[in-house]
Image (spheres, rainbow, N blue to C red):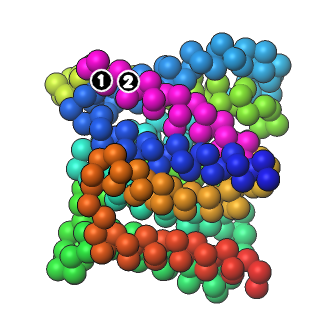
Amino acid sequence: MHAYLFLTFTALCWGANAVFGRVAVGEVSPMAIVSLRWFGVLLLLLVVARRQVRADWPVLRASLPFVIVMGATGFTAFNALFYVAAHSTTAVNIGIIQGSIPMFVLIGTFVAYRTRITGRQFLGVAVTMIGVVIVGSGGDWARLAALAFNRGDVMMIVACILYAGYTVGLRRRPAVSALGLMTVMAAAAFAISLPLSLGEMALGKFQWPTPFGWLIVGLITVFPSFLAQISFIHGVGLIGPGRAGVFVNLVPVFAAILAVLFLGEPFQLFHAAALALVLGGIWLSERGKAE
């Protein structure tokens, strides 16, 4: 029961993050968000998790390369692509594409651990991918035939693949507390984000937050970054990456609702079809586990 609450709260926060990403356009640049969010998370963790980090440090130090890769993949790279994508796609699209993460997790667990994929699970993967393709093509069959996808949607697909790899990797997490692990990964994410921010500065695209931008960064730091990530790590620890990944299918639902309510974004027929396919694919995949 606790795992379900943790993972549902995580999905709600990540759905809200799609809205935050869109609202942040023009208020703060993408790499500034990534660096500032992980700096903020690191400060919060150093306040609340110092004891856990000290207790866990011998184990964490032995696993440092693994933890750094996890922070770079699941935190820095995913977020960098996410906020850049928000400049050229909608919050609804971002949320629906995030719904593909469980399918990439399923594929990743097969590749990494040779977990058996049933016929129904394979069908679920195919159905979900059709939904993602419909979103990427904007429901335009001519664009689909020409394989002309929105740039932001393609970035989100790559981001989802990276986060799925992070989720699969959590199965091999060192035997430490969630807060201790999160602190070191946040430190790695912040350090790795700095060259990206410097590159954005060199291109003349770096933007410090406006007053409203600081509010957005604060919300992103507390909810999608701090509370949601800790909840996700706890959830994966309780029920495993395969079952935990399924809860990501709630992200497109929350994102679509929040985007329509707070951004006034249109929810078109192709969005409904894609959402039904994504959720239907997840359902088929879960039913397939019983075979």
In the rendered image, is residue 190 in sight?
A: no
Helix or strand or loop: what does disc 1 sit on?
helix
Q: Is residue 135 above or below residue 289?
A: above
> Left of 160 or right of it: where is 203?
left
| Snapshot quadrant of residue 43 | top right
Q: CA distance from mark 1 to mark 2?
A: 5 Å
Mark 2: give few (<14), some (14-19) or many (20+) Cα within 10 Å: some
> Left of 117 or right of it: where is 248?
left
Q: Amino acid at mark 2?
A: Leu
Q: Position of residue 2 (x, y in %)?
A: 78, 48
Cβ atoms under marks 1 and 2 closer than 8 Å: yes
Q: Amino acid at mark 1?
A: Phe
Residue annotated with mark 2: 215
Helix or strand or loop: what does disc 2 sit on?
helix
Residue at figure coordinates x 37%, y 29% from the top left? 216
Residue at figure coordinates x 56%, y 50% from the top left? 11
Residue annotated with mark 1: 212
